[in-house]
Image (cartoon, grey):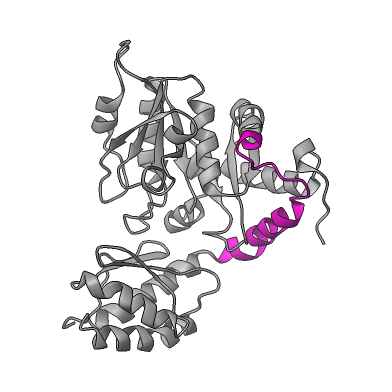
Amino acid sequence: AAEVGDDVLDSDPTVRLLEERVAAACGKAAGLFVPSGTMSNLIATMAHCWERGSEYIVGDESHMYIFEQGGGAQVGHVHARAVRATASGELPLEAVEAAVRADDEHFPVSRMVTLENTHNMLGGVPVSVEYCRRLGALCRSRGLALHVDGARAWHAAAAFGVPLAELCADADTVSLCLSKALGAPAGSVLVGPEDIVRRRGVRLRKLLGGAMRQSGVIAAAGLVALDDHLPHIAQDHETCRALALGLAEAGLAPETAPATNLLFVQTHCPDKAQQLVDACGEEGVKFLHVGRGRLRFVTHHQVSRGDVDASLPAILRHADALGLLRAA
C-alpha cells in the first residue's frame, strides 16, 4: 500500500518521492505531479508566459497545437504561433528565429518555444540531443524559455541510448507522461527550476483543478512503472519493428520504419480505415484511425512479440476483405 498524506498541503511522501525521482532523472531541480500531460503542458505554458500578451512558438503538427483544445489561448490567454516541423520532428532554426516577434507594441511578446519529443503525428520520431542543444542555444540567445512536451521522452532517450538528463539538458521545463510511455494508470510530471515548477506551477495546478489530496495512491503506480517498465522500454521498439515488418510483408506498408513505439500506415481507401479499426477491435486488436485513412499502432509493455504474431492474422484478414492490401 502507498504511504499517503495530503498533496494539496505538499505532504504526500509518495508523490514527493515520484517528483524527486523524475526530476533527478531529467537533471532538473524540481518536479510536479499532475493528472495529465495536457495539464502539465498548460501549466508550463502559463508559467513561462506569465504576462498577458505573451506568445509561444509551436510545431504545426504537435500535440500541444492540435490535441489540447488550444488551452494556452482558451485558459491562459497565450497566443500560439505555429512553425512547420520537418519529418525528423525538428523546428527549423531559421523558422524559429523568424517567428520571434520584434519588440513592437503591435505584436504579442515571444516568451517560449515548445518541442515535442518523440513526435507523435510524425511517426514517433525521436529528436536528437544535438538538435536540442542548438535549439536551446537559440532560445537562450533570444531570451526564450524552451519547453519540451516529452510525453514519450523516455522512448527518445532509449532510441538514442543516452541518459534522459542528457536529452533534457537544454530544456527549461519538460513534461513526462507516466501512462503513455510507462503504462501507469494516470499522471504526468512537469520538471524544471524551482521558481517555475514549485512556485508558479503549484499555483497553476490548483487553479486548473489538478491538486489532489491522497494522490500517493496514483503516484505509487508511477514509481512501479519507473522500476519495472522503464528498464525494458527499448523492447517496445523491437516489438513495433516486428509489427511493421509483418504488416509490410502482407501489403499494408507503414509510412516509415518505426524509430520508437509508434507506427503509422496510410491506407489508400480512407473511407474503409475506420471499418478496419472497428472489425479488429471486435477481436480485441486495438489501434486508431487518426483521420484521412491514416492508422496508428502503438506498442507498450503489455504488448509482446507473441501478441503481435497473434494480432497480425486478424488485421490482415480484415484488411484484405476491405481491399486495403497492396502487393508487397
Residue 169's spot in the image, x, y percent?
A: 50, 37
| 141, above or below 80, in the image | above
Where the N terminus falls, by quadrant? bottom right
Residue 214 colored in magenta in the image: yes
Q: Residue furthest left?
A: 327
In the picture provided, is 26 more to the left or to the right than 238?
A: right
Residue 245 in view: no
Question: At x 48% / y 33%, what residue is drawn?
Answer: 45
Residue 292's spot in the image, x, y percent?
A: 24, 63
Between residue 281 and residue 96, name the one nearer to us. Answer: 281
In the picture provided, is 218 more to the left or to the right than 322?
A: right
- Residue 248 in which image quadrant: bottom left
Question: At x 29% / y 31%, what residue is drawn?
Answer: 96
Residue 125's spot in the image, x, y percent?
A: 35, 55
Residue 28 colored in magenta in the image: no
Question: At x 35% / y 83%, what residue is drawn?
Answer: 315
Question: At x 31% / y 86%, what residue is drawn?
Answer: 318
- Residue 200 in which image quadrant: top right
Which portion, as a residue range, is magenta? 205-232
Q: Main secondary structure of the magenta part?
A: helix
Where the C terminus falls, by quadrant? bottom left
Between residue 44 and residue 76, name the one nearer to us. Answer: 76
Residue 327's spot in the image, x, y percent?
A: 16, 83
Between residue 141 and residue 273, name the one nearer to us. Answer: 273
| 256, above or below 84, in the image | below
- Residue 137 in which image quadrant: top left
| 251, above or below 217, in the image | below
Residue 110 in view: yes
In the picture provided, is 7 more to the left or to the right than 307?
A: right
Between residue 125 and residue 12, name the one nearer to us. Answer: 12
Label tally: 0
